[in-house]
Image (cartoon, helix red, strand yellow):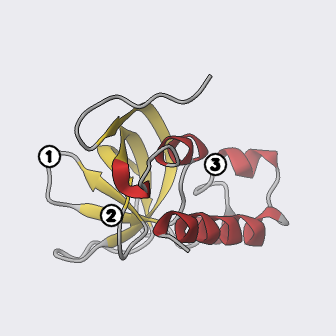
């Protein structure tokens, strides 16, 4: 099982675990609208420009552009996953965008912080070499 499959499995398990208690409004708000996640949020949600990608170790990462900061999202927005799944090999695609993230852990300098992605907009997927990636029609 590759890293992409592991990330998808973890996401699927977390979705199944919360699906029984979620209504339509909560599904539209994966962090603030999900009581299990909302109770873990330790600060205000905020917007960042970031690059999402699959990687070794922490299967899904989000680099905050203009910093040395990488955070570990607990969820993958469906549209971001659609782009990342186009990578062959799995690590070949990155997705830049504006991400609203909600901190699940307090910030400790030098440590990767767990976050929940509330929303992802203005997405642009590329291969590592900069060539654009488009979803099939």
**Residue 69 placement: quadrant:** bottom left
**Which residue matches tag 1?**
66
In the foreground, 46 or 89? 89
Which label's residue is closer to the chain start, 1 or 3? 3
**Residue 98 placement: quadrant:** top left
Specify the label residue 29 is tagged with.
3
How packed mark 1 is, by other alpha carbons closer than 10 Å (few <14, some 14-19, many 20 or more), is few
- Quadrant for the C terminus, please: top right
Which label's residue is closer to the chain start, 1 or 2? 1
Specify the label residue 136 is tagged with.
none
**Residue 113: where, in percent of width, then height?**
33, 71
Residue 74 placement, left or right of 62: right
**Which residue matches tag 2?**
71
Which label's residue is closer to the chain start, 3 or 2? 3
Q: CA distance from mark 3 to mark 2?
A: 20 Å
Q: CA distance from mark 1 to mark 2?
A: 14 Å
Mark 1 residue element = loop
């Amino acid at each position: 099982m590759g890293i992409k499959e592991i990330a998808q499995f973890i996401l699927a398990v977390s979705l199944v675990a919360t699906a029984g208690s979620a209504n339509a409004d909560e599904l539209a708000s994966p962090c603030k609208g999900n009581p299990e996640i909302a109770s873990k949020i330790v600060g205000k949600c905020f917007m960042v420009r970031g690059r999402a990608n699959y990687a070794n170790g922490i299967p899904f990462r989000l680099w905050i552009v203009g910093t040395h900061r990488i955070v570990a999202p607990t969820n993958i927005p469906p549209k971001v996953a659609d782009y990342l799944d186009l990578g062959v090999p799995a690590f070949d695609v990155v997705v830049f965008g504006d991400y609203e993230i909600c901190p699940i852990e307090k910030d400790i300098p030098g440590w990767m912080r767990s976050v929940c992605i509330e929303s992802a907009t203005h997405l642009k997927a590329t291969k590592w070499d900069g060539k654009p990636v488009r979803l099939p029609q």
